[in-house]
Image (cartoon, grey):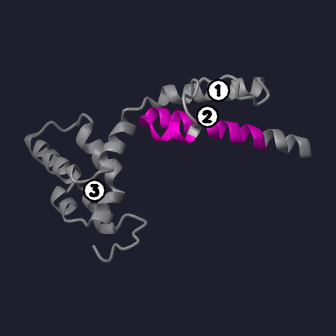
């Protein structure tokens, strides 16, 4: 396991524990090591398993117990519920709309009218709305960069 201070990558010990789905070894990981594996562990615990055995059911309970003490899990769960295919389709439509409109922000497929400023809207929104706001802003920036580049060419 070793020193995990400033851990930026998954240790070989943690990787092997994930690869073998060794929940006892996973339970022995430090918080920083476990944090790097959260998205995988959340998917393992919440998605329908191919393995319907009793041993997997017990392992899954252990994984859920591990995850129950981590606050970031709720955010990951919320993101897992997002329909990314539909989001991608809306982003593509938004990109085409911005391209046709010359980059104006008049209409948006990703974001309906903002009730408050962008920052407040982002802070008070659910994960899907946050993704939509972020995508909309990224597309606006990309469009501005692209239009500015054409001026200088």
Residue most toward the front?
116
Q: Which residue is mark 2?
A: 136
Chain part drawn in magenta: 119-145
In which quadrant of the rendered image does the N terminus lie?
A: bottom left
- The answer to whether residue 96 is visible is yes
Of the numbered discs 2 and 3, the one sitting upstream in the chain is 3
Between marks 3 and 1 in the image, the one whose residue lies nearer the viewer: 1
Residue most toward the bottom?
3
Q: Residue drawn at (32%, 52%), measured in percent from left and top?
A: 38
Q: Residue drawn at (32%, 77%), measured in percent from left and top?
A: 3
Tell me the element at label 3: helix
Whether pointer 2 and pointer 3 mark residues with C-beta atoms closer than 8 Å, the reply is: no
Tell me the element at label 2: helix
> What is the CA distance from the residue labelled 1 to the residue labelled 2?
8 Å
Tell me the element at label 1: helix
Say above or below: 14 vs 73.
below
Asked if residue 153 lies left or right of residue 16, the reply is: right
- The answer to whether residue 153 is visible is no
Whether pointer 1 and pointer 2 mark residues with C-beta atoms closer than 8 Å, the reply is: yes
> What is the CA distance from the residue labelled 3 to the residue labelled 1?
39 Å
Q: Which mark is residue 18?
A: 3
In which quadrant of the rendered image does the C terminus lie?
A: top right
> What is the CA distance from the residue labelled 2 to the residue labelled 3?
36 Å
Q: Which residue is mark 1?
A: 94
């Amino acid at each position: 396991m070793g020193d995990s201070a400033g851990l930026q990558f998954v240790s070989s010990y943690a990787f092997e524990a994930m690869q073998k789905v060794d929940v006892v070894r996973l339970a022995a990981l430090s918080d920083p090591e476990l944090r790097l594996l959260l998205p995988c562990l959340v998917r393992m615990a919440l998605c329908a398993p191919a393995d319907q055995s009793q041993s997997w059911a017990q392992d899954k309970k252990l994984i859920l117990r591990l995850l129950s003490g981590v606050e970031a899990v709720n955010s990951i769960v919320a993101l897992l519920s997002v329909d990314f295919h539909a989001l991608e389709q809306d982003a593509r439509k938004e990109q085409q709309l911005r391209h046709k409109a010359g980059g104006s922000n008049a209409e948006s497929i990703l974001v309906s009218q903002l009730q408050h400023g962008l920052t407040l809207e982002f802070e008070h929104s659910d994960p899907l709305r946050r993704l939509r706001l972020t995508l909309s802003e990224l597309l606006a920036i990309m469009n501005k960069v692209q239009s500015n580049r054409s001026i200088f060419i």
